[in-house]
Image: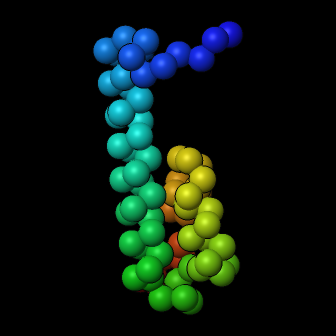
Amino acid sequence: MARKRWNDLSDAEKTAILVAASIQIALAATAWVDLARRPRDRVRGPKPLWAAAIAVNFVGPLTYFTVGRVRAPR
């Protein structure tokens, strides 16, 4: 299958790619800010490892938000 260039894509395909990229960037940025501000004892595992994991597509930030953070006691 030949690779399509940006100009070969339809407007709907371009929009879908831009929306997905925007969501990915927003998720990663939010996760990195949360990680930087969260105390070390409120994170499961080493912070540098989570910082690297967050860079992995949608999986990294979603995993950090669901597994990597320790909830504050009530």
Determine whether, in the image, residue 57 is placed left or right of residue 14. right
Figure check: 10 above or below 16: above
Determine whether, in the image, residue 27 is placed left or right of residue 55. left
Image quarter of residue 41: bottom right
Quarter of the image that includes the N terminus: top right
Percent across and percent down for residue 60 are: 58, 56
Please tell me which residue is depicted at 42% across the width and 22% down the height of the picture.
Answer: 6
Q: Nearer the viewer, residue 22 or 64?
A: 22
Please tell me which residue is depicted at 56% across the width and 70% down the height of the picture.
Answer: 51
Quarter of the image that includes the C terminus: bottom left
Figure check: 15 above or below 36: above
Determine whether, in the image, residue 47 is placed left or right of residue 26. right
Specify the color scheme. rainbow
Residue 63 visible here: yes
Percent across and percent down for residue 58 are: 53, 47
Q: Nearer the viewer, residue 30 or 55?
A: 55
Please tell me which residue is depicted at 65% across the width and 81% down the height of the picture.
Answer: 46
Figure check: 66 above or below 71: above
